[in-house]
Image (spheres, grey):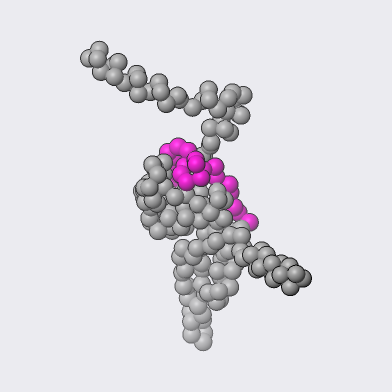
Amino acid sequence: MARDDKRGGGRRNQRDETPEFADRLVAINRVSKTVKGGKRFGFAALVVVGDQKGRVGFGKGKAKEVPEAIRKATEQAKRQMIRVQLREGRTLHHDMEGRHGAGKVVMRTAPEGTGIIAGGPMRAVFEMLGVKDVVSKSIGSQNPYNMIRATMDGLRKESSPRSVAQRRGKKVSDILPRRDEAPAAAPAEAADA
């Protein structure tokens, strides 16, 4: 019996050691500095980190070696995480726009089964966030840094019906439209025309 307990405990420890956050390397940039003896290379990494349950962050790191740049970027991303409320744990609550510099992104909610329709850097953010259905478009700058910053700007603007109701001192049912009223009103207007 004692052996079984030890084995079970060992498995639990292995599960605890698995990283809490997933990370995605979005871009890596090599820069060179010409010096007397030749060229010195440096690397800049852009990383997106998330728990795939509503938390996401991004970071950038610079170093002489690629692994060190990625490590620095990952640490910065973990420090700068934000929480985003998801509807049904799979999509956004409402449509929104995000801006940063010349970068502009549009993000829209999507029905179940749509998947992630987004460009490279935006896709990384949505995957690390845990969004399963979203339609998005990047307008303007194609620079991955600006695209990610614009996406994060839009995600910060998102608010759930619960938070809006709490802010206004109302119930969630008072804020959300009733589903049975909307379709019934449309045929009556068509009959008048």
Give the residues in magenta: 79-100
Q: Main secondary structure of the magenta part?
A: loop
User: Can residue 76 be seen here?
Assistant: no
Identified at 41% across, 41% down, the residue is 109
Measuring from the top left, give residue 127's x and y in whole percent: 47, 55
Q: Position of residue 86 (x, y in %)?
A: 51, 43
Where is 174 relative to 69, above or below? above
Q: Quadrant of the N terminus?
A: bottom right
Report whether 115 appears left or right of 71: left
Residue 50 figure quarter: bottom right
Give the camera-side residue of 33 and 99. 99
Query: Where does the image place residue 155, in percent across and percent down from the top left?
Result: 50, 45
Quadrant of image for the C terminus: top left
Q: Residue furthest left?
A: 193
Q: Which residue extends farthest top?
A: 192
In the displayed structure, 180 sits above or below 127; it is: above
Q: Position of residue 128 (x, y in %)?
A: 51, 56
Q: Residue at x 44, y 39 (%)?
A: 96
